[in-house]
Amino acid sequence: MTWRGICIATLAAGLLACGGDEPAKAPPRVAPQTETPARAEPAAPTARAPEAAARPYACIPGDPAAGAPLYATLCASCHGAHGEGDGPAGAGLDPKPTRHNDGATMNPLSNDRLRTVIARGGAAAGLSPQMPAWGSAIGQQGVWDVLAFVRSLAEPAYTCP
């Protein structure tokens, strides 16, 4: 199977796992309450996670937790589950897939450059044309989420400029 076939199969498997093009179902309707309680108790405050918990990188409007399953589906076959460049589909590629966990290489790269590579493919950034474009498959937020996850793999850790 060619690298393109592997990528398409990986994408198709991910879409099937996520429900593909199946329309979202409306939530069930709840009948209105007919009686008012004699004494309404105030609702307990809900604990909200701080914005920084969902977005550890102030310079990236993406969530690494949301990017992790996208990365596993779309990227790990070449780049490896932990970003080591050792995915099974990447074994036969020349050049070898980038090691996303290599902070010395990845941290200096701008978020705009990484976003371009994820969304428009390697050729759009002067890299290997074997790196497919995922932007139309996962949308702008998906690209940001994958970018945030890629940043989370770096050793030493990535910090925003």
Image (spheres, helix red, strand yellow):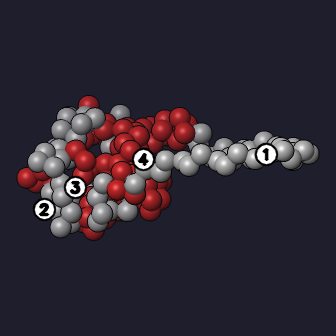
Dot 2 amino acid type: Pro
Dot in front, 2 or 1: 1
Secondary structure, mark 3, is loop
Question: What residue sits right under mark 4 in the picture?
Answer: 66
Q: CA distance from mark 1 to mark 3?
A: 67 Å
**Residue at image point 84% right, 44% down:** 38
Question: What residue sits right under mark 3 in the picture?
Answer: 128
For the N terminus, which image quadrant? top left
- Residue 141 x, y percent position in the rendering: 45, 59
Q: CA distance from mark 4 to mark 1?
A: 41 Å
**Sequence order check, earlier mark of 2 and 1:** 1
Question: What residue sits right under mark 1 in the picture?
Answer: 39
Dot 1 amino acid type: Arg
Compared with 81, 21 (above or below) is below
Q: Residues within 10 Å of mark 3 (few under 14, many from 20)?
A: some
Dot in front, 3 or 2: 2
**Sequence order check, earlier mark of 4 and 1:** 1
Compared with 96, 52 (above or below) is below
Secondary structure, mark 4, is helix
Query: Which of the two residues, 107 or 3, is positioned nearer the viewer here?
Result: 107
Q: CA distance from mark 3 to mark 2?
A: 19 Å
**Sequence order check, earlier mark of 1 and 3:** 1
Q: CA distance from mark 4 to mark 3?
A: 26 Å
Number of numbered discs: 4
Q: CA distance from mark 2 to mark 1?
A: 60 Å
Dot 4 amino acid type: Ala
In terms of image quadrants, where is residue 140? bottom left
Task: Report the disc number at residue 108.
Answer: 2
Extreme-right residue of the structure: 34
Task: Report the disc number at residue 111.
Answer: none
Secondary structure, mark 2, is loop
